[in-house]
């Protein structure tokens, strides 16, 4: 029997630390809202129609369309509940207000150099927006926490599994 997951913790979604707000960039908020609307207005109605049609065909126990449709409907409903909760507690923070600043805040794109001489570019975003392959890191990640409030030219210490690493801030930018 399938076990229902906790709606607060969608599969693979990061938890929001207790006592903090769900900060999001305007782009991340818009993307999440579009996913919610697409699920509500397009995907869910299509699956409901397929399940209704499959149910009208009789024996449901061996009806693949019905079984798959019901499973997909549960997945969609779970995701809708998750998105609703996250959007309800979202606090949209526009990083453009810091345009021109050399200090690191939420929404900053930061170029830093580690002790090995590697240059790394990251953008500090909300927990629901992070995408390490695109250089987007969550503001609650250890790297982001080490960088927040530092300025261009500063060096910050980052505790890693391999020991302490010194990160030197090379550049900070914000969207215009």
Image (cartoon, rainbow, N blue to C red):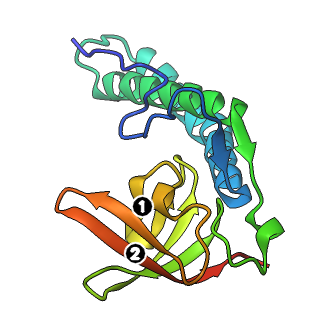
Can you tell which quarter of the image residue 89 is in?
top right
Can you tell which quarter of the image residue 31 is in?
bottom right
Q: Residue at (47%, 22%) from the top-left corner?
A: 7
Q: Residue 128 or 82: which is nearer the viewer?
A: 128
Q: Which residue position holds label 1?
A: 143
The percent position of residue 127, horizontal first and vertical second, equals 52, 47
Classify residue 57 as left or right of residue 149.
left
Q: Residue at (36%, 25%) from the top-left corner?
A: 71
Q: Are marks 2 and 1 in contact (CB under 8 Å)?
A: yes
Give the spatial CA distance, label 2 vs label 1. 9 Å
At mark 1, the secondary structure is: helix
Q: Which residue position holds label 2?
A: 167
Q: Look at the picture and state if 69 lies above or below 148.
A: above
**Camera sees residue 145:** yes
Q: Earlier in the sequence, mark 2 or mark 1?
A: 1
Q: Look at the picture and state if 153 lies above or below 70.
A: below
């Amino acid at each position: 029997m399938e076990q229902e997951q906790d709606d607060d913790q969608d599969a693979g979604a990061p938890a929001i630390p207790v006592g903090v707000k769900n900060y999001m960039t305007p782009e991340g908020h818009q993307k999440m809202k579009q996913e919610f609307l697409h699920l509500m207005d397009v995907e869910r109605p299509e699956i409901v129609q397929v399940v209704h049609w499959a149910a009208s065909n009789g024996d449901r126990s061996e009806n693949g369309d019905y079984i798959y449709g019901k499973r997909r409907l549960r997945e969609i409903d779970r995701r809708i509940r998750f998105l609703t909760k996250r959007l309800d507690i979202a606090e949209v923070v526009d990083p453009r207000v810091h345009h021109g600043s050399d200090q690191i805040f939420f929404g900053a794109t930061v170029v830093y150099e580690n002790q090995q001489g590697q240059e790394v570019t990251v953008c500090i975003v909300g927990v629901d927006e992070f995408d390490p392959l695109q250089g987007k890191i969550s503001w609650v990640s250890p790297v982001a926490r080490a960088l927040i409030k530092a300025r261009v030219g500063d060096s910050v210490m980052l505790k890693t599994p391999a020991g302490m690493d010194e990160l030197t801030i090379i550049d900070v930018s914000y969207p215009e």
